[in-house]
Amino acid sequence: GFAFLKTKKVMMVALPACVLLAALTMARNSDWKDNYTLFEADAAKAQDNSKLLFCLANTISQELVPNEPGRENKEQLDMKSIELLTKAIAINPEYSEAHAELGSIYDRRRNFDSAKVHALRAIQINPANAIATYNLGRAYYALKEYPEAIVYLKKTIKMQPGIAIVHLNLARCLLEYKQYDSAIVYFNKTLAIEPALTMAQQGLQKALQQKSVADTTKRQ
């Protein structure tokens, strides 16, 4: 199965613009309690500001949803983020980060066709968008389009080489594609970064076993 895990290192590249915007507005905004209340108040006053809409959606998706215990509330928060991001893109169709964040939400919701559409668009606008590159690899993997998944997961590793989960997803994709030697390499790279990662340990054993069976079959 696919490793549906997020990594803070991957996700953090979307945040500097929002952090800067928060810093610039925090002092003058009497509505400030946290990032959500700050961006919600400012977005209500400037509904044609794509950056504010994006930052509000990003805050909901990255800060509120992970800490929300109720499934129905998570659903409502996702729908609000999707609405905000759709508005941001309508205002600025070339907003790569908004497409990438929308792709991340669809990925989380297991709507991989939509995730792929927005990840592709984000990369068309900005080929250096690491989040979109990773999400596209994830979407291709989930859709069992393994050659394409391998390409984009490898691109993500070139952009951000020290993230274990990206190596793990690539290793598992290679294993599904029966590229056993390469899968073993990337499981080992995953464990070099995070030695205690159970999924990588289990995946490595599975890859070694499947390679052994395949080698035996070839010799017969």
Image (tube, rainbow, N blue to C red):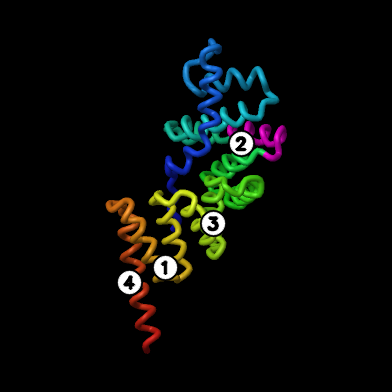
Q: Nearer the viewer, mark 2 or mark 1?
A: 1
- The quadrant in which the C terminus is found is bottom left
What is the magenta range? 80-94
Q: Secondary structure at mark 1?
A: helix
Residue of label 4: 209
Residue indicated by mark 2: 82
Residue annotated with mark 1: 182
- Which circle's residue, 4 or 1, is located before the other in the chain? 1
In the rendered image, the vertical position of residue 156 relative to residue 208, given as above or below: above
**Is the Cβ of the residue at disc 1 closer than 8 Å to that at disc 3?**
no
N-term-proximal mark, 2 vs 1: 2
Residue at the spot 70% in from the left edge and 35% down from the top edge: 92
Give the x, y percent position of residue 168. 40, 56
Residue 116, position as x, y percentages in the image: 60, 51
Q: Is residue 61 above or below residue 174?
A: above
Question: Mark 4 packing: few (<14 Cα in 10 Å), some, or many (20+)?
Answer: few
Dot 3 amino acid type: Tyr
Q: Name which quarter of the figure residue 186 lies in.
A: bottom left
Secondary-structure class at tag 4: helix
Name which residue type carries label 1: Ser
Residue where numbered disc 3 is placed = 152
Graded by Cα atoms within 10 Å as few (under 14), some (14 to 19) or many (20 or more), the crowding at tag 3 reads many
Q: Which quadrant would the N terminus be assigned to in this image?
A: bottom left
The residue under the point 37% across, 87% down is 219
Report if residue 174 lies within the magenta region. no
Q: Tell me the CA gap for discs 1 and 3.
A: 15 Å
Cα distance, mark 3 to mark 2?
24 Å
